[in-house]
Amino acid sequence: MKRISILGSTGSIGIQALDVVKKQGFQVVALAAKSNYHQLANQVREYHPSLVCIYEEEYLVPLQKELDGMEVQIVTGMEGLCQAATVPEAEMVLNSVVGMIGLRPTLEAIYAHKDIALANKETLVTGGELVMKAVKEYRVNLYPVDSEHSAIFQSLQGNKIEQVSKILLTASGGPFFGKTKQELLHVGLQDALNHPNWSMGKKITIDSATLMNKGLELIEAVWLFQQKPENIEIVVQRESVVHSAVEYVDGSVIAQLGTPDMKIPIQYAFTYPERVDCDVKRLSLFDYGTLSFYRPDYETFDCLTACKEAISRGGLYPTLVNGANEKAVELFLQEKISFLQIGEVVKQALELSLPYQEVTLEHILQADQAAREFVTQYFHL
């Protein structure tokens, strides 16, 4: 019975992870959520963790009232999130929180010798150098949960990383595939939230619409699979059936296919190297008939271009574009800026000058803050 701590338990990944936990008979030892205290309380009643964290402190008292009389430790804030990531009885930590707040809990979990199932992109985007060094030093395992990175991980099984020629990182293309900048001038919030294949949280759905999500995954792949940015080719795969692939030096291409369902990569991270029955719809290639592949549009989607440039420069540049994007998406969700302005300001963030270059946790947090302040000033908010 694997003992798991789930960070981001009320989000899309967290909810599906709990479904996997229930089916496989795993034990939940800690749960953490940002603000949805009511759903979190229901999860505590069902899964009986020893510790629960509500990140936003304003919801601490309501959660305490909901859980009155239950034997569970209740914590809050970043310190509480780190406690949830390091509870002694946990063997594995699933980090599915959204945004930069995921970096420190990941590091703390590694320092506590926990295996990591990683669904928090920003951990590797901003702190890839620190995280991968810590994974090696503390001899823990890091399993990717993103469908694309899980597909690459699965396609690497039985082969050596030195034999890889390039990685084919697939993208759905989002709701605005084939659109020009002129056509995107007046798209609204609901248009951007209408993803064709996946049901996700608002932030990641917007990132998919701007292709920022694919830019972040490109940066992640560089760290996860020890590749140069130029060895990772982004391929738009509209049906989201081919989740990614690996080309080897002999010309062979090995891919992982499946229906668009996050339970598959979540469960594989939990059970690796074993494969067990998963409660998902089986893939029928006959139902699809045709699979389509296209080149991404770097001219229209500035976020993707900015991410490629950021990882090519290295250092703190990925943190700058990530921080700028998080703030810009927040403003777009509040309908304070337009859709195209997200990519515009993310690209501009690359021009920020920082007084420090060394990648440390302190410098990452400072660069992130500088990027967010830049966005606010850029739009005079």
Image (tube, helix red, strand yellow):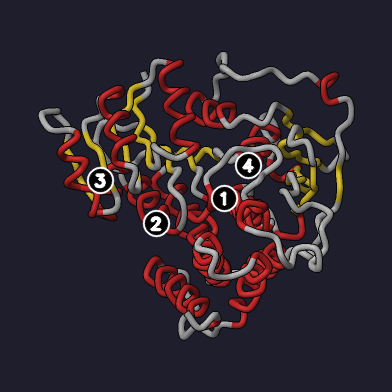
Residue 204: give its label.
1
Q: Secondary structure at mark 4?
A: helix
For badge 2, the amino acid type reads Ile
Residue 347: give its label.
none
Q: Nearer the viewer, mark 2 or mark 3?
A: 2
Q: Nearer the viewer, residue 100 or 209?
A: 209
- Read off the residue under disc 2: 101
Task: Quadrant for residue 146, please give it.
Answer: top right
- Read off the residue under disc 4: 149
In space, the residues marked 4 and 3 are separated at their CA atoms by 27 Å
**Lower sequence index among marks 3 and 1:** 3
In space, the residues marked 2 and 1 are separated at their CA atoms by 15 Å
Asked whether residue 362 appears in the rendered view, the answer is yes
Residue 190 position in % (x across, y down): 62, 52
For badge 4, the amino acid type reads His
Q: Is residue 333 above or below residue 11?
A: below
Residue 119 position in % (x across, y down): 51, 43
